[in-house]
Structure formats: C-alpha cells, structure tokens
Image (tube, rainbow, N blue to C red):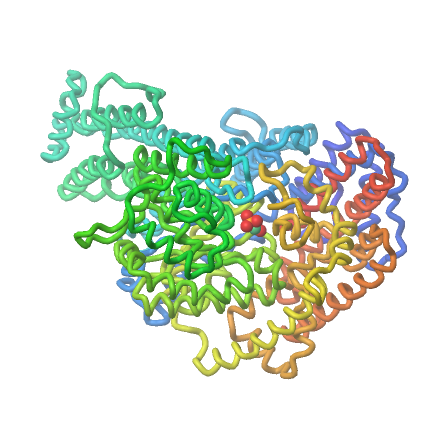
C-alpha cells in the first residue's frame, strides 16, 4: 500500500506495505486496491481529527468486504513483523551482560550470581490457551518473510537457492493473500501438540544451547543449565474433555522422538567433524575406552578414536530411540549398542569426549574444547533430557473431589465424602494416604469421569517408567481452595503408584509428581498463605518437601482479574506472593511461584521483563515458571533470534529480581502498601458493582456484555480444542477468562485491563503520594504502564457503537455511560499520576506503533458491527458469518495481545 504518513519512519513497513499493495492490485483487482486505498487514507484523516470524513464502507459489496478485511489483516501482520524486527515490542536492555553490570554496580559479584544459578530454574511453559487466531500456515509464511528480510538486511540480492530476495518476499505475500485465513475444522488436541512441538523442536532446541554459549562468555565460566522449557499441551484437562490418557501418551511420545532424532543428527554430525587422528594427536584413555567399546572395527577409522567413540554413542542412542519410540532410528547405523538407561548416561559419554578435547587443548591453544557443537549438545542433553519439555498435568479441584468421593464410596470407606466438612475430609484423606492399599477395584464399574482420570494418571506413571521422572514433575490443581484439594490429588497419585506412603520403619512419604495448588480468585489468593501454612504443618508433607527442598504454588492472573478487576487482581497477586514468602520461610521450604498469565493485560500480560522485576522482594529466589500462551508464543518464540532475546530477558529479570536489594525502604513499602490497599478496595467495589451487581448476580450486565461484544461469534474461530465455558451456565464466573478478555478487546473497551482504576485514583486523597509511587515503585509503575497501553488501544467512540448492538436500549443506557465515565476517569487519573499531558508521552516508540494501527482497526470495527447487526437480524448469507470471523481475526491481529 502507498506510504502512510507516520509509518514513513519505519522503512520495513513501507517496503512490505508497498508489496502488499502490489499483491492486492495484481490478485484482487484494481477496484479493490483503489477502494482499500481510499478507506485507508480516509481513516488516517479521521484519526488526524477529520471526524466527519466518510470512510465509504457502505459502498463495499459483501465480497469486497471480505477481501478488504483480509487486506487490512495482512497489513497488520506485516506491520507486526516489521516492528518485531525493530525490537519495538522486544525486551530492550534486557541482556544478561547488562544485568550483570547492573548487579556489579550494586556490589553483587559473580560468585553470588553463580551461587544463585546453581539452584535456579526458569521455565517458560507453553500452553494451548486459545488466543492465537492465525493458522500455522499463515505464521509459517510470516516467518519465511522474516528470514528473507534478514537476507535483505545483509545486502543479499539472492537467496542461497538463487531466488531474487525481493521477488521471494513478494511471492510469500502473494501466498499469504491466497491462503485461507479461517480454519475450516475445529482444532484437536493433537494439532495443539504438533504446534507446540514445532516450537520446541525448531526454536527451543537450537536456541537454548546457543544462548548458553553467550551466557558462558558473559560470566567467564560455564553456567549451570537452569532453563527448563515446559508444556501443558496434552496434560491440561481442566475444562477440556478432549485431553485424555491418549493425548498425554501421544504428546510425550512425540516429544521424546523429536529430541532423540535431534541428538542422533547431532552425534552424526559430530562424528563427521571430530576427525582427529592418533597419528597427529594422542587421545586420552577415556576416549580410547569408548572407542574400544564401540565395536567399530572399520579399518578406515582405526586411527580416529573420536569417530569410533561417536559411532558407539550413536549406536547406543539408536537403541534408546528404538526402546522409547518403538521404532528404528531414521538412520539406523551399522553397530549394535545397549540403550542408555537415562540422559545422564548419554551425557557422561559426551563429557568423556569433551574432557579429552580439553586435554588436547592443554597441549595446544584451547580452540577445541570451548563451546562448539559438542558443548551445545551437552547443554541440550542437560536441558531437554529424553523428554524435551516437562509436561504438566492440570485438573480442576472439583473433578478430583468427585473422583475421590466415588472411589471412597465404591471401596466402602465413606458413603458421602462430598458432604464432609474440611477437617473431616483432611483426616479421612490423611488416613487413606498412610495406607498403601489402593482404593480402586478392577471389579467395580466407575463413572466415565473417574475412569478417565485414573487412566490419565496411569499413563503418567507409565511415562515416568519410560522416559524418567523429569517428563512430568507437576500436577496443577485449579481452583484450589483448601488443603483437602491437594490431598485428594495425592490420593489419586497413590492409586497409580506415584505417591508412596511412608513406612512403619520411619521412611518418609514420597510423591513422584508434586501437587501444585493454583490460587485464582481474589478470595483464594487471600486464603493461600493460611492454606499453605496448614499444608506444611502436615507431617507427611514435611517429609515430601524436605526431599525436594521446594514447593511450587501457581497464581492465576486472569481469573483473579475476572473476579476482582485489574487493580485488585495485580495487588492480590503481589500480596499473596509476599505473604507466601513468609509462610515458606517459616516452614524452611524453598518457594517456586508459577505465574499463570496470558498475553492481554487483563490476563496478566505485558512485558515479562518488567513483570518479573516488579515481583515483590524475595519472592523470586531464582526460581520462576511462567505460562506462555496463544499468540504470545509466536510473538516471543517465532524465530530463534526472538526466542533468544526473550529467554535472555527472562533470565536477566530473574537474576535482577532475585539479587537486587529492595528498591524501597521498609517505611515506603508500608506507606505504599497501605495506599494500594485503599486503591484496591475502591477499585474492587467499582468493578464488582458493575460486573456482578450489588447482589452478586447481575443478569442485566450479563445480557449487556453478551449483546455488546462478539462473544458468541468468537467460538466460531475454532482456535482451540477446548469449550469456551467450563459449564453450561451463562454466569460470568463460569465463563473462561479468555473469551471474556477477548470479546472486550474486540469491542475496543478492554474493560478487564482498567475498569475500576479511575474511580480508585480519583477517590484517593493524596495525589502526591500516587505520583511518588508511580515514580519509585516498580510494581505500581509496571501496573500503570500496562494499563496505559490498554487505554491507548481502547476507544470509547467505537465502543459506543458496539453498545448500539444491545437490544434493550434502557439497559444499554444504564450501563454504557458507567463504562464511559470510568474510562475517562482512568484516562485522566493515569495522566495526572504519571505527570503526562497525553498517553504514552514517555514511550514514543510504542506511541508510534499504536497510532499507526488505529486507523486500520476502526474500519474493521465498523464493518464488524454492521455484519453482526445483519446476522443477528436473521440474514443467513454465509459470507456474513465469514466476514465476522475475518474481522475478529483482523482486529486481534492489529491490536496484538488482545486475548
Ligand atoms: P484457564 O486460563 O481458563 O485455563 O484457567 C485462563 C487464562 O489463561 O486466561
């Protein structure tokens, strides 16, 4: 498309936009191109203040509407790509070297850093949470364009295959134009497993070892392997009936196969590389022994002990591949070897070779043993084992409750478990946990739910036996509200041998999979410290945690937001973390927090670097797990370069959050916390009053929300395997947080990202104190910064048009003005507290990025509203449904992080 004022400063956007314009003209026709251009230019004018400019949308036929929406969507996609390249959305200044320098400036030396890293764990955990609207084929084209742009940057005019670079880019854009945007079929869990696998295999596997090389250089010594990628896909069955024992088994098998094939290729390549001959350099005894044991008697390699040793390693790895996958290795190899019992044994062989190379270096110059392919392979084995990514299990506490109740009843232990109070439950469960005999009987007929739960846990036990215990280490209990919720899971784990009662002779109980509570409502976050205190007081738990030295607690950002609004959610998460820190310290147990956050601010989104750094003092302790979901995955881990940038940002932030002295004095902490309590209480009251009504059940608001937003239409996107609600009810409490946040974003309200904050800021008497907090308190600054982005992307003028979709005008007139005035108060309060005269004044790059997008989003919103109106008025034309879905897709793409 022709040059847009405002994007002129980003030459990539100009370049890609021009090519897209060429493609639209060539493949969509000149009329479509002209219309699109006209709307674009008119919309830009409108955003410059020409409020009465007519966009001419009503002149588009239905077919033209669909093409137009696709064109704008593709433009947004290309603009996102260009921005990612410029690092507008990347974590800036977040590299490890900068963090080390900063720490050094604060008197924290390398030894302290290394000490922390010895016990550190950083885990990005990929989940299938459905917010990625783009099909994989579209993302693949996007990535190919990104790779071609890199070639172009380097001044290349040809690709290695001889294509002209610019023509190749044009071709990819033309393919994008001709690729169907919407999914025809719903997604299955296996599709989600495949998607995660492609990131793990193509990005994490090569990127992490490469990153460690950079870190080793920055620290001047080998750093421990502390990053452990994780996944939920195939194991998270909370509200997803399609996740079964089969999905778990498939996910683990595919992951293991992928990592073993990677190792086979790497060992093969090493064999080609390490051609050292004993004629020219002696080999040490370790390598000689491996060479002898390999059974490789080929005359041509008789003077090449490294190659012979690697042939033997290859044979053992191929045998491992056969044992774990049931299939021969893709390139079977001529020698026979015994399978490796575990990744440590494989690593030990590699280390023998590395050591031998180091010996060689002692004779010479040190060129052989530092880094290199062997160093990266050792890293990979330490990081990915034979399982690739740790797979978590997750289920809702209510399901465990029912399953345990049924088992107890059928076994004749307790006829009505569900009617018992908490303390009765706890004593019954503890008694059961001390008894090694299982409850389930092969002769009894259980409900489908119970059978399915037992089956998946049996599959987990089998996986431990096959791939080793690192393949599944945690089981998350959603909606955890009590100690019995955790004990119930242990009962189920005991059924399959993953929990062992302590013996009479005094040995402690043990659990091969850790029960992890997920606290996710405001009330549950408040109760979390008491629950964990009670948990640690149980003698059997003390034994288990002593063996492991830490316990994980997961905290949920989106559900707490849906429950209590933005400010109260962020503050409750922070307070719960701080309170838990003391509980853990008293119990002498290390704390590992698992942050369940999404991409949108209403789901805890925003810069991970800032978010980790803004964690309350003492709560990170070098260990952190964070969910990575939906569109965030492609955004952060779409290419090796971006994965390296983002993983490094995570590592640096973790170091800083763990080691930096507290930014605030105790007195300021107390003052600021008291202020936050007040702010949070008024924001909570405003939010609850709007969303849930004073009687806690506001049917009017529910109707308003459902009619004003495209909530119902979103499920047609087929972006995830799981249903939108956990139950059939239409209560906001039962709606999953993702469609809640996603639909508010489409209507440009983005209510979960700010509602209630304005009222709280304006009611707070001491504005000077608020300004001080915004300046000097990372927690408050990060909360405001995230909210500022949301406010900048929301638009009450467009929102008012969505409110026009609500049939009951009196209802709309009662509710929408409250949202509008809340928004205005939030906007004004934010500027006042941050001392700005307009939004994003202090963030020019972000400001430019958002301003660029707005004129592209408004026409999409307006078209969406018209299409929804026609559809709801009974127009059955299939193109209308398609247009709505395309517009949802396009708006989500243009807004970025909308779900
Ligand atoms: P959940 O996730 O619905 O799976 O608990 C909520 C979210 O990520 O927003």
Q: Nearer the viewer, residue 262 or 486?
A: 486
Q: What residue is shown at x 37% (from left), y 58% (from top)?
A: 427
Q: Quadrant of residue 436?
A: top left
Image coordinates for residue 845, horizontal then vertical, percent: 62, 58
Residue 43 in the image: state x and y as whole percent. Answer: 81, 50
Q: On the picture, is 7 further left or further right than 638?
A: right
Placement of 68 over or under 428, stated as above or below = above
Q: How many marks?
A: 0
Give whichever of 257, 414 is nearer the camera.
414
| Left or right of 46 in this view: 364 | left
Viewer-nearest residue: 366 or 893: 893
Q: Is residue 547 above or below residue 195?
A: below
Q: Is residue 391 something that shows in the picture?
A: yes
Residue at the extreme left: 285
Q: Is residue 26 left or right of residue 406?
A: right
Task: Classify 337 as above or below 634.
Answer: above
Location of the N terminus (image quadrant): top right
Note whether residue 388 is visible. no
Residue drawn at x 14%, y 44% as measured from the top left: 362
Residue 350 percent coordinates (x, y): 23, 36
Q: Position of residue 703 (x, y in %)?
A: 77, 53
């Amino acid at each position: 498309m022709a040059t847009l004022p405002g994007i002129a400063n980003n030459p990539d956007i100009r370049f890609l936009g021009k090519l897209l314009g060429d493609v639209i003209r060539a493949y969509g026709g000149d009329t479509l191109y002209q219309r699109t251009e006209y709307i674009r230019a008119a919309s830009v004018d409108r955003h410059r203040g020409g409020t009465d400019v007519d966009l001419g949308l009503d002149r588009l036929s239905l077919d033209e509407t669909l093409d137009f929406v696709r064109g704008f969507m593709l433009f947004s996609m290309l603009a996102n790509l260009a921005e990612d390249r410029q690092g507008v959305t990347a974590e800036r200044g977040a590299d490890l070297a900068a963090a080390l320098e900063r720490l050094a400036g604060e008197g924290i030396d390398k030894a302290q850093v290394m000490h922390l890293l010895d016990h550190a764990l950083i885990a990005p955990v990929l989940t299938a949470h459905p917010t990625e609207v783009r099909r994989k084929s579209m993302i693949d084209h996007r990535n190919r364009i990104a790779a071609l742009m890199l070639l172009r940057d380097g001044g290349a005019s040809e690709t290695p295959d001889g294509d002209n670079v610019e023509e190749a880019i044009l071709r990819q854009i033309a393919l994008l134009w001709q690729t169907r945007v919407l999914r025809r079929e719903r997604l299955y869990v296996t599709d989600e497993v495949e998607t995660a696998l492609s990131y793990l295999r193509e990005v994490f596997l090569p990127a992490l070892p490469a990153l460690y090389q950079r870190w080793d250089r920055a620290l001047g010594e080998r750093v421990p392997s502390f990053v452990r990628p994780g996944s939920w896909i195939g194991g998270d069955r909370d509200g997803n009936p399609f996740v079964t024992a089969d999905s778990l088994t498939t996910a683990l098998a595919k992951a293991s196969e992928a990592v073993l094939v990677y190792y086979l290729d790497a060992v093969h390549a090493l064999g080609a590389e390490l051609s050292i001959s004993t004629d020219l350099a002696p080999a040490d005894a370790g390598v000689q022994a491996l060479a002898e044991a390999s059974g490789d008697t080929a005359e041509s390699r008789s003077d090449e002990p490294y190659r012979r040793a690697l042939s033997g390693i290859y044979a053992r790895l191929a045998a491992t591949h056969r044992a774990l996958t049931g299939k021969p290795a893709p390139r079977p190899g001529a020698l026979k070897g015994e399978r490796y019992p575990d990744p440590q044994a494989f690593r030990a062989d590699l280390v023998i070779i590395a050591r031998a190379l180091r010996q060689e270096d002692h004779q010479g110059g040190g060129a052989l043993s530092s880094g290199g392919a062997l160093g990266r392979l050792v890293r990979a084995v330490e990081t990915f084992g034979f399982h690739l990514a740790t797979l978590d299990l997750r289920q809702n506490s209510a399901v465990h409750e029912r399953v345990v109740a049924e088992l107890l009843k059928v076994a004749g232990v307790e006829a009505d478990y569900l009617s018992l109070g908490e303390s009765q439950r706890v004593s019954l469960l503890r008694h059961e946990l001390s008894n090694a005999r299982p409850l389930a009987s092969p002769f009894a007929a259980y409900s489908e739910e119970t059978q399915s739960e037992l089956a998946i846990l049996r599959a987990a036990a089998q996986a431990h036996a096959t791939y080793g215990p690192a393949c599944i280490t945690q089981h998350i209990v959603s909606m955890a509200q009590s100690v019995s919720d955790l004990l119930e899971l242990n009962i189920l784990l005991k059924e399959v041998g993953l929990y062992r009662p302590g013996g009479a002779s005094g040995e402690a109980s043990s659990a091969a999979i850790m029960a992890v509570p997920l606290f996710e409502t405001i009330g549950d976050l408040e109760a979390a410290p008491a629950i964990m205190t009670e948990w640690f007081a149980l003698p059997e738990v003390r034994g288990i945690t002593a063996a492991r030295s830490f316990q994980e607690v997961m905290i949920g950002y989106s559900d707490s937001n849906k429950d209590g609004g933005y400010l109260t959610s962020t503050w409750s998460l922070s307070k719960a973390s701080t309170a838990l820190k003391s509980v853990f310290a008293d119990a002498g147990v290390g704390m590992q927090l698992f942050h369940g956050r999404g991409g949108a601010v209403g789901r805890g989104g925003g810069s991970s670097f800032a978010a980790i750094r803004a964690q309350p003092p003492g709560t990170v302790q070098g260990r952190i797990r964070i969910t990575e979901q939906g569109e965030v995955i492609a955004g952060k881990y779409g290419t090796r370069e971006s994965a390296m940038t983002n993983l490094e940002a995570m590592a640096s932030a973790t170091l800083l959050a763990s080691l930096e002295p507290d930014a605030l004095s105790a007195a300021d902490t107390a003052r600021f916390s008291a202020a936050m309590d007040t702010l949070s209480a008024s924001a909570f009251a405003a939010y609850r009053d709007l969303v849930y009504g004073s009687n806690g059940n506001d049917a009017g608001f529910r109707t308003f929300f459902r009619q004003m937003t495209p909530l119902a239409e979103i499920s047609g996107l087929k972006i995830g395997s799981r249903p939108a609600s956990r139950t059939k009810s239409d209560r906001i409490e039962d709606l999953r947080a993702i469609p809640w946040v996603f639909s508010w974003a489409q209507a440009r309200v983005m209510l979960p990202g700010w509602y209630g904050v304005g009222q709280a800021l304006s009611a707070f008497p001491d504005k000077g104190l608020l300004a001080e907090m915004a300046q000097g308190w990372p927690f408050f600054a990060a909360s405001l910064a995230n909210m500022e982005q949301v406010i900048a992307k929301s638009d009450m003028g467009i929102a008012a048009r969505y409110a026009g979709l609500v049939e009951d005008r009196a209802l709309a007139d009662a509710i929408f003005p409250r949202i509008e005035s809340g928004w205005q108060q939030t906007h004004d309060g934010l500027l006042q507290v941050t001392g700005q005269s307009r939004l994003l004044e202090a963030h020019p790059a972000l400001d430019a990025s958002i301003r660029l997008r707005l004129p592209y989003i408004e026409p999409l919103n307006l078209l969406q509203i018209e299409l929804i109106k026609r559809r709801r008025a009974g127009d059955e034309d299939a193109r209308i449904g398609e247009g709505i879905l395309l517009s949802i897709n396009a708006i989500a793409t243009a807004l970025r992080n909308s779900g």
